[in-house]
Amino acid sequence: QVQLVESGGGLVQAGGSLRLSCAASGRTFSRNVMGWFRQAPGKEREFVSAITWYDDITYYGDSVKGRFTISRDYAKNTLYLQMNSLKPEDTAVYYCAARADGRAYSSAWSAYGYWGQGTQVTVSS
């Protein structure tokens, strides 16, 4: 089992920045891909970004490319999402996710078996 705990959400004005963190514990050696998804009220869960844990390859959804940066601290078992130039449409609950089945990166939320509790990000206009 892998446990994930997110932090860092909050309220920010449009154009501002936030950094989300996701601390991983448990059988962390088994996870090979970690990512961020978000879900706004009444909408589908959306892929935001992912990173391959051991070789640090990053992926981004089209709506956040150039504004968000995913990174990880290998020693601290922590995933980050730096969000800049935030827009009201970025408002959502952001979830940290981990894939531990040895398969390659995927942008489908169903491919990830471990999830955090979510953290709210609200961007005011």
Image (cartoon, rainbow, N blue to C red):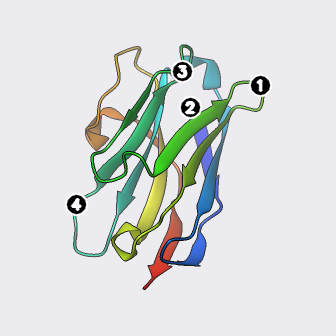
Mark 2 element type: loop
- Label 1 Cα neighbours within 10 Å, binned few <14 / some 14-19 / many ≥20: few
Q: Residue at x 53, y 14 (%)?
A: 55
Q: Mark 2 highlights which residue?
A: 1
Q: Residue at x 27, y 46 (%)?
A: 62
Mark 4 element type: loop
Q: Residue at x 49, y 20 (%)?
A: 32
Q: Is residue 14 above or below residue 23?
A: below
Disc 2 + disc 3, Cβ < 8 Å: no
The amino acid type of the residue labelled 2 equals: Gln
Q: Mark 1 highlights which residue?
A: 75
The amino acid type of the residue labelled 3 equals: Asp
Foreground: disc 3 or disc 1: 3
Residue 114 percent across, percent down from the top left: 47, 39
Calculate the distance from the C-alpha at mark 4 to the C-alpha at mark 1: 33 Å
- Label 4 Cα neighbours within 10 Å, binned few <14 / some 14-19 / many ≥20: few
Q: Mark 3 highlights which residue?
A: 56
Instruction: Choose the circle earlier in sequence order: 4 or 2.
Output: 2
Left or right, residue 77 beside residue 79: right
Q: Residue at x 43, y 35 (%)?
A: 50
Disc 4 + disc 2, Cβ < 8 Å: no
